[in-house]
Image: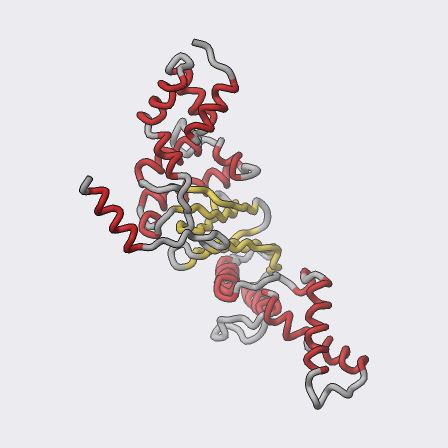
Amino acid sequence: MAFTAQDVKKLREMTNVGMMDCKKALQATDGDMDKAVDWLREKGLAKAAKKADRVAAEGIAYAAVIDGVGVVIEANSETDFAAKTPAFVELVENLAKVVAKDAPADVEALKGCTYPDSSLTVAEIMQEKVMSIGENLQIRRFARFADNVSVAYVHAGGTHGVLVNLAVEGGIDATEIGKNVAMQIAAMSPKFWDKSLVPQADVDHEMAVQVALMDNDPKMASKPAQIKEKIAAGKLNAFYKECCLLQQDFVRSDLFQGSVEGYIADAAKKLGGSVKFVDAIHYVKGEGIEKKSEDFAAEVAAQIAGAHK
């Protein structure tokens, strides 16, 4: 029995399984829709698709430098327990290798790449992992730096993944510098890398806040507007110091007392070269994902009731 592209689309809507697997199912069953659904269920793919409805907010934020290419990636699972299993950790590490090697444009392109040491695609491997691990698994995002020198840092087993990109001159090893900057990013979560990157709207807003504070201060309220604006402009340095990485106080005061920018310059000079911060990516595991609120007692009761049916 022949089948059309519309049949493939319909089977996908019925099962929430990928197009390629739906096509394979229809090929294997001569276009019989009901048998194709059973074929997918027997292969475990339809069950895997059902798991895809569940929220995956745990997982790992991972960073690595692979063959000179810096990669940071976040992959999610439903539980922290699954995220810590060797199978999930290996999956994320291999996904980073694919990103480094193939430079996919986005997550969908990554899913179409060949998985390391396999003839299967990343999407096909993901479906297998869903079945073996037993949870919804998702690739959420990734980024890569192919140029300059990258340094990776993973905090607390994957709660934060940070990738720092540096322009290094003088043939020096900037790994420690990069790692210390990455740790600063993980600890302080700066909103901007440098004060030059702060949008004018944010600067104007901060100025307005500072002027309003003086307007409400009995000791300052009577001062001329020009004076207030001048004072407010002077206080912008405190704003930059709080929000901008390079202007922040370096947290490792045992190594250097001053700004992060000052630390980078000082550490590079001591090594006999120069280092310039270029860019960074900071992923926080599950950031922005709305976790489903569950009544744990009700969930356990439902499981017990189901077990006795």
Quadrant placement of the N terminus: top left
Q: Is residue 49 left or right of residue 85?
A: right
At horizontal 43% and vertical 53% (from top left) the residue drawn is: 291
In this orientation, which residue lies closer to the viewer: 170 or 129? Answer: 129
At horizontal 55% and vertical 39% (from top left) the residue drawn is: 106
* The image quarter in which residue 42 lies: top left
Q: Is residue 160 visible?
A: yes
Is residue 223 placed above or below 151 in the rendered structure?
below
Spot occupied by residue 66 in the image (x, y as percentages of width and height): 47, 44
Q: Is residue 151 left or right of residue 205?
A: left
Is residue 308 placed above or below 149 in the rendered structure?
above
Q: Is residue 161 visible?
A: no
In this orientation, which residue lies closer to the viewer: 101 or 108? Answer: 108
Is residue 73 placed above or below 251 in the rendered structure?
above
In this orientation, which residue lies closer to the viewer: 183 or 47? Answer: 47
Q: Is residue 171 left or right of residue 300?
A: right
* The image quarter in which residue 32 lies: top left
Spot occupied by residue 104 in the image (x, y as percentages of width and height): 54, 37
Spot occupied by residue 243 in the image (x, y as percentages of width and height): 60, 67
At horizontal 64% and vertical 75% (from top left) the residue drawn is: 238
Quadrant placement of the C terminus: top left
In this orientation, which residue lies closer to the viewer: 113 or 253? Answer: 113
